[in-house]
Each structure stands twice: as structure tokens, then as C-alpha cells.
Amino acid sequence: MSQDEAPYRRVAAEIRDRIATGALRPGDRVPSTRAITREWNVAMATATKVLTLLRQEGLVESSSAGTVVASTAGPRDRPRPAAEDLTRTRVVRAAVEIADAEGLAALSMRGIAARLGVAPMSIYRHVAGKDDLVLLMADAVLSELRLPAGPDAPQGWRPRLELAARMLWRVHRAHPWLAHLGPLTRPTLIPSLLDYSEWWFATLSGRGLDPALVLDLNVVLYSHIQGLAVQLEREAQAVDDTGVSGEQWMHEQESELAARLADGGHPAFASAMAWFGRTGYDLDFDALFERALTALLDHLAGLLGSGR
């Protein structure tokens, strides 16, 4: 193979060979962008182009496990959708699928076009650019926040806030990339989030609370949900990069941790670690969410002078 060939094509050719020889079989995970940068010593942009090219060829596809060898033949074996069949909804849905599987960093117009089997420029007939697309994606998944109205809505401020918070957490758990929408100091004016905020403020309206306090509590809870979602995404990326689960990684650190605690300089922490060694500990993100929600609502109950 010529050394003058573009680096991304050389890397793609090697991965293509692995697929052709059966070293990588349908459903197997292919190297992630980070893994490609390490193995072939190329830039992240080059690694992204590698996976984009392989998607365009129909050799790989996104899944909940990351980018995997496609289970079907390439696009040349199936009809190419006409550009007029493309809709904004299809573009957004494809973008969400990619972001769910690989994160926002892997999202590109070329990748979306390859997934849909259309020319990249046709995507721009429906979205102005990536920033516009991400907002549309966020609104689409946050529309899953279907808060009930009328007699179907729970009674009492606490059940109402619990319902809204749990729904927001479920959406972020399913789509962790939502945590990267923007800083809290620059809130995104997404209709679905405005509906959520309206529910929060309406629930606490007329209860003698300063609007600033109501907003603060809303921000604290939202920040907690964002933080957990970021950790979910980071763990998924770490597994993709290393092939090692969080549990395996922790097990590999046990001997080093024991050595660091052996000098007796951290007795309280050492005692806690010994207790975990006997009983075990599961870092449960759902449980962490519930702990924080309970603490915040208990605090709010104290401010209101009532638990309900």
C-alpha cells in the first residue's frame, strides 16, 4: 500500500482487512476513535474519518455497545434512499442513535449521511449545522418528559417533584450526552426543558418560597443529574477505550490501594475499605440519584414546614 495514501485510508484498509479475514466478525466491536489514535498514532480527526469511511462502506454500524462490525452487507447491496425521502425527523433520529452509542464527539454530518445512505450535503437541507442539530436532538429526547396533566397528575408537591425528577433522570440515563448541552450559566431554551421548569415552579407556586430559592433547588437537582450522566458517559468511553469494566479496574487497583493504606496514615478510610471488603460495595447511579433527590426534598420539606 502506498505510503502517500491518506492516513485515514491506510488505517481503514487495515480494519477492513480484519473484517474480511474474520478477525473481526459481525457484532464485534471495532477500535474506537481513541483506540485508533493510540494504535496507529494518528490524530482524533483522522480516527473519526476512519470510522466514517467504514460506515459509508456499510462495514460498521453504531450499537449500544459502541461501533461494531455491521451484520448486513454494505450500502452497495441495498437501495440508496432518495434525497426527497429524507426528513428532519429521520436526520435527528439517526443523530441520536449515533450519540447514544458513541457520544457527541463522534457525531458528524458525514456519519449521519452514511447511516442514512444519502449524500452529506443533503443533511444541510434539514439542519443548519451541528449546533442546530444538537438542539433538535435534545428537544427530541427531552420530549420523552411527558408530565401528566389534570386528574392524571399526582397530588401534593413532593410526589409531583419526585415524578418530574425521576423522568428527567431516566432521559439523561438513556442519553448521557445531554449533559454536554451547555453550562448552567447559559441555559438552553428548549421547549421540553421549559415545560419541565414550568412544572417545577407551578408545583411550588403560592407556598411562600422566594423564586430564587425555587430556582436554586431546581438547578441543584439538575446539576446532580447532569453530573451522574457525565460519569455514565465517561465510564462507557473508558470501557470502549480499554476493554476493562469498572469492576475489573477496581479489582486491579486493590493491591496498590492496600499498599498505600498500610502505613496507617488514613485509619478511617482504611476501616471503611475493610468494611467494603467484607460486605462489598456497588456504585449504583440510580441509588445515588435517589439519595440526592430524597435529601433535597427533605430539605425542601423543612423549609415548607411539612413533609407533604
Image (spheres, rainbow, N blue to C red):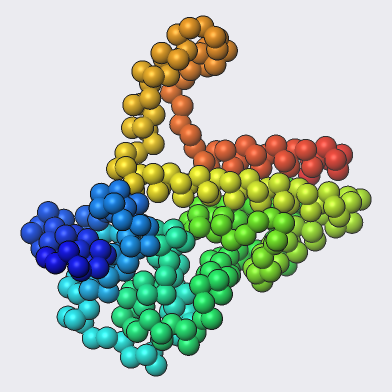
Quadrant in which the N terminus appears = bottom left
Q: Quadrant of residue 7?
A: bottom left
Which quarter of the figure is the C terminus placed in?
A: top right
Res 14 visible:
yes
Residue 204: x %, y % from top left: 82, 54
Residue, x 40% and y 65% (percent of image)? 98
Frontmost residue, 231 versus 42:
42
Furthest-left residue in view? Answer: 21
Position of residue 102 measured from the top left corner of the image (x, y, whole percent) = 39, 58
Closer-to-camera residue (251/209): 251
**Observer-nearest residue: 292 or 34?**
34
Residue most extreme to the right:
208
Where residue 39 appears, as percent x and y from the top left, is: 25, 49
Residue 129, x across and y down, in percent: 52, 77
Q: How many dots with numbers? A: 0
State left or right for residue 19 relative to residue 61. Answer: left
| Foreground residue among 9 and 138 | 9
Q: Residue at x 32, y 76 (%)?
A: 114
Q: Can residue 275 be seen in this view?
A: no
Residue at horizontal 45 percent and vertical 15 percent from the top: 260
Q: In which quarter of the image is residue 71?
A: bottom left
Outermost bottom residue: 84
